[in-house]
Structure formats: structure tokens, C-alpha cells
Image: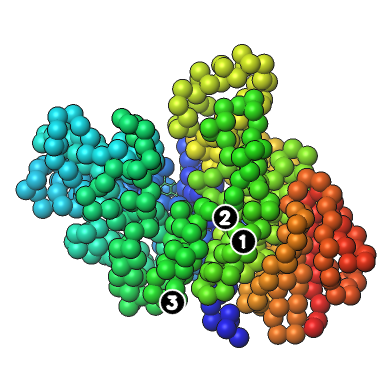
Amino acid sequence: MKNAQINSEEIIYQVYPKSFLDTNHDGIGDLNGVIQRLDYIKELGVTAIWLNPIFDSPHVDNGYDISDYYTVDPQYGDMSLVATLIDEAHKRGLKILFDLVLNHTSSKHYWFQEALKGPDNPYRDYYIWKEEEEKEKLPNNWKSFFGGSVWEKESETGDYYFHLFDKEMPDLNWQNEAVRKEMIKVAKFWLDKGIDGYRLDAFIHMEKAAGYPDARYADPGKLASAEEFFANLPQVDDYLREFSACIRETYPNAYLLGEAASAVPERALNYTFPKGEACDSIVSFKYFPMDEKKKDHRFPLESQEGKLDITAFKKVMDEWQRKVGEVSEMTLYLNNHDMQRAVSRLGDPMKFREESAKTLAVGMYLQRGVPVMLNGEEIGMKNLVLKRWENTRIECIHEVYATLLDRGISKEEARNYLSSISINASRGAMQWTDERFGGFSTVEPWSGVNQERMYNVAVQEMDASSILTFYKRLIQVKKTPLFTHGTYEMLVSKSPIMSYRRVYENKQAFVLSNLSDETQESEIDLPLFSDQDAVLIVGKYSYGEGTIRLSPYASLVIKTTL
Ligand code: GLC
Ligand code: CA
């Protein structure tokens, strides 16, 4: 079968190490914590772990600002713990993927410190510089992802250096062959230590448009996003393929999961096809079209996304499945550390937390592709409710809070809103128990934690109807050939029920998920089935005369023989 060669059978579990488990009582998760929970991860049924960066870093951006690619951040552990982690993971049949930041380093990195010494320094050309042409005039109007200009004036020479993210994260110059070689060296270093692959951070930005032309749709004198000039340029493909080829020469099976936030299906295909020449799979942030009409008008509109546009979402999934899933390998995900928690963002964390957590997972993960799950989603973790105001990346947070209270909004609602727009929304400490600090630590976690009686591992492990128990069953179902290698067909309907059919050899499955908070009906011809054919059920369903009826956020998965 054609698809059999395409899809690997990985199920990736993303561990945000800083928030996973703290074992030395400093409020920060650590490698020892990951090691201690390997059995837990194994029991979920996943096959691989992706760890966010664990290298030396001043933590301007939680480790994505790397000051030494060859050293483990002492707050996480040391080299011998990495060795233990790899070893113990492998003993359990789990792969380890590290997170490799290709686009930039920390300003504290040796290369940048050298580069600062002046234009003659050999490392100067590792970064992107522009001379000041007119006094106090920025080289162009591009806005950085973290606010302000992408250009920062360096005091010695008065030249500007380029940074797409924080000013402490200067972009590397990938046109420089020496940079490309250094990154391959880094990648091989950890592969030599035994890891199984990488998540490639923000690689789509490795090339910027020649001459740095001004963003076109900017108000005069204002900065604007210029994605078209610094994301997914054709040259990125070449860098990626060169990188991949050099690595796969020695490590043909290394798994490469690319982060390509703004990639559309056509781009994603370039990055994943043919298999073995670039990434295995990529994460695009374009899976979840939001309905802007559904914003809450009591809160500032510009910072809100609205609610999931279910009709558009079904179309988007169908398109990705046809253009990418059928040809190369697609990533399936609901959460990551840069987004809100899926139950809060796409589901209903108040009225239907259990049902929406389960049904979102059914709808997403039983499609064709490789699941990537963020730690905590398996127990239905919602957005972290902020208790501290610092490091949220929200401008004037105190003022915003005060204004909301003045408008008569309750403290709880104001906090929930601020939580949803905070950079740490999904980075709350893992909820292991209902103890103080969620069993994550004996001291206050760096991020804060939601202490919840029902939403923690200990309680859910004992409960046959919990989200956790459900996730384990779902993962087992996902691992059968029907769901890893079967064909995919979206069953088109106007209803907010997402329905698709998978076929493999003489087996077929129908997956039906009501993504809305109301009972819904859909006209779909299902084969004759009995209750035994239902491999997964969430909520309530009824079927008769070609119409399926599902309660709010209910799901039904049936499997029959053809
Ligand atoms: C990626 C990471 C994000 C980080 C950025 C800069 O998008 O996922 O957390 O801030 O790259 O490295
Ligand atoms: Ca710790």
C-alpha cells in the first residue's frame, strides 16, 4: 500500500522540561524529573519524547536563547543525566528528540560576543549586520515577533544587528557556510550521544529577502510584520536539505520534526518530501482557523482570537490531508508551548471539560499523521491561571487588569483573560497530584500551577472514565495499522460534526466528533454496526435512518470489516 511507506508510527510526547517535575526543590523542572517519569510516559503508549531546549541559556526566552549548544543548562542537570535519560528512555523503547535552535543564538553566545568586537572579527559574519545609513534611521520597518524593530543598534560601531525575536537573540547568518557547518556539528554532537532526532526550531526564518525591503502594508513611520520577507523563502529549502543530508549520511533514521509556524500545505510539502531529504514532518500553526465574530466584547478585541471556526477547520484538515497527509507525513497536534491549552482555546473548559478534551483528541489524532501531544493535555490541563504578573509578555499588565476590574469584570474572569493571552498559558507546572504545588515541586513553581482536585495524574490514573485513561485507549487505537497507515477520507457535511473514514486492507473506521457545545446531527451513511464495533465513545450518540446524533462534544468511532 502506498501509505505504508509514508507514515512512520511515532507518537510524540512533548515534555516542557521546565514545567514537568522538579526533583531538587528549586521550583524548576529538571532532567532527573523527566527520568523519574519515564515509566509514566511509557505507559501512555507514546513512542518518542521531544524535549524543549535544555542547553546553557540566560533564559530570556526560556531556553530558546542558547549560549552554549554543547552544555546542559545546570538548572536541568548535566551530561551524565543526559546519558541516563537517553539510556533509560531507550530501555523502554522511547526515542528522544532534542530541540535545536537554528535561526539564532543568545547574545551571550561566544560567537556573538566575538562578533561584537568589530567588523574584522572572524565571527562578525556569523550574524546579520547593517551599517547605519542615515542618523538614527532604522534599516527598515520590520517588526520583531517580540515587539519593537528587528534591528538593534550596537554601541561600538553604531551598526545594527538583526533579531527576529528578542534583542538578546541575534539571528545567525545562514548564507555563511561556516554557520551551516557549525550547526551540523552541533546536531551530530547530540546524535553521537544517542538521541534519535530533533525538533527544528523556527527554521523557516533562516533566510531573509535580499536588501531587506520595507514591509508593504505598514502605516507611515510604523513597524509592521514582514513575514513574506523572512519566512519560507526558497533558500530555506536548500539549507534544510543540506542540513538533513549531512545528518542522514551518518544517521539515516534521525527523526526531524520541523517547526514551520506559517507554512501552508504547499510549503509543508516542500519541507517533508521526498521522505528522508528534509523534515519527516512539520508543525504548522495554520490548523485552527478562528471565528473572529465570536470574540468576547468585554475584553480588548485585538488580543483575542475568537472561537474555533468548525466549518473552516474541517476544510483546513481536509486540505492538509489531501495535499500533505497523502503524499508525505503530517503532524497532528492540539497544543504546544507557544499556544493556549487546547481545552481552553478550542474546547469548553467550564461546562464540557472532560468531553471536549477527549473529543478534540479523537477528531485530531485518528486522522492520518503523527500525533504530537504536549505534557498535561492527557489530563485535560487548561490555561495556567496567572498568579504572578512578571514574564507574561503582556504590555502594561497591571493597568490592563485594573481597567478590567473598573469595567465590572470579576477578578476570576480578568485573570482567565490575562492567562489566555500570556506566553505562559500552556507552560503551567504539570499537575501530578492534588497536593500543594500539584506534586510538581515542594516549593512554588517558577510558572505557577493550577491546583485542581480532579485534573491531576494521581486521581485520573485510578478512574476508568478519566481523560487520562481515555488518552491511553485512544493511543492504543491510534497505533493499529488502520489509523497509522489507512487511507483517509473526510466525509463532507454542513454539521459541526467532523467525520472521516479510514480504510486499511479489509477494515474500515468511521470517526465522528461533535466539535460544538450543542447536540448536533449529521446525515451520514454508516454501515450496520453493533455496540461492539464502537471502539471509542465520548458522551452520547444515537443513530437511525442515516442520521447520527451526538451530544455536546461527543465522539463515536466505529470499526467494521469490509
Ligand atoms: C519557536 C519556539 C518559541 C520561541 C521561538 C524563538 O517558535 O517554539 O517558544 O520563542 O521559536 O526561538
Ligand atoms: Ca529543579
Q: Which mark is residue 262?
A: none
User: What's the distance in space between the residues labelled 2 and 3, CA to CA?
Assistant: 22 Å
Estimate how packed mark 2 is, as few (under 14), some (14 to 19) or many (20 or more) residues with alpha carbons within 10 Å: some
Mark nearer the N terminus (1 vs 2): 2
Q: Secondary structure at mark 2?
A: helix
Q: Residue at x 57, y 31 (%)?
A: 301
Asked whether disc 3 touches disc 1, contact meaning CB atoms under 8 Å apart, the reply is no
Q: Residue at x 19, y 63 (%)?
A: 177
* The C terminus - image quarter: bottom right
Residue 425 image position (x, y, % from top left): 56, 39
Q: Which mark is residue 287?
A: 2
Nearer the observer, 256 or 507: 507
Q: Residue at x 58, y 39 (%)?
A: 305
Above or below — where is 91 with respect to 58? below
* The N terminus - image quarter: bottom right
Q: Secondary structure at mark 3?
A: loop
- Read off the residue under disc 3: 274
Q: Which amino acid does the dot numbered 1 rest on?
A: Met
User: What's the distance in space between the residues labelled 3 and 1, CA to CA?
Assistant: 21 Å
Residue 15 image position (x, y, % from top left): 52, 53
Mark nearer the N terminus (2 vs 3): 3
- Read off the residue under disc 1: 317
